[in-house]
Image: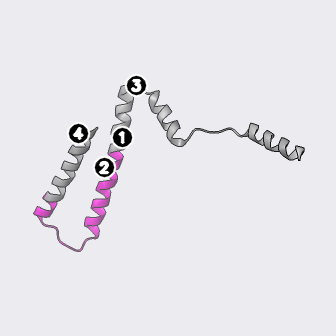
Amino acid sequence: MQTLNRRKKTALVHEVKKPSLLRQIVDKVDNMDEAEKKLLLLTLMQDELSAKYKMLDSEIASSKEIIDEKKINALVTATRNEMYEQKIRS
């Protein structure tokens, strides 16, 4: 029994608890200056918008429906409004 307890204690001593991935990210961002933080945010937003536009392009390309100008304008307006709201929130 003593041997088992010693093994458990030894195992606990050797276990090193790593910070979570989120904590590691926050630590990196905390070490950045304001300009680097803004650049990082813009990069993340750009990646998000690029993915959204690629998805829309593939939907349009795979669609057999002909899209008229009114529908295109509505999509552009909705996208611009969403981007404006995101800009206001940040």
Which residue is labeled 4 in the image?
88
Which residue is labeled 3 in the image?
33
For the residues bearing labels 3 and 2, Cβ distance under 8 angstroms: no
Which residue is labeled 1 in the image?
43
- Residue 72 part of the magenta-drawn span: yes
Camera-nearest residue between 42 and 13: 13
- Residue 78 part of the magenta-drawn span: no
Magenta span: chief secondary structure: helix
What's the magenta region?
Answer: 46-73
Q: In the image, residue 74 lies at what x, y percent?
A: 14, 58
What is the C-alpha distance between the residues marked 3 and 2?
25 Å
Q: Quadrant of the C terminus?
A: top left
Question: Mark 2: which amino acid?
Answer: Leu
**31 left or right, relative to 20:** left
Classed neighbour count for the residue bearing mark 4: other residues with Cα under 10 Å, few (<14), some (14–19), many (≥20): few
Q: Tell me the SS state at disc 4.
A: helix
Q: Residue at x 23, y 39 (%)?
A: 88
What is the C-alpha distance between the residues marked 1 and 4?
17 Å
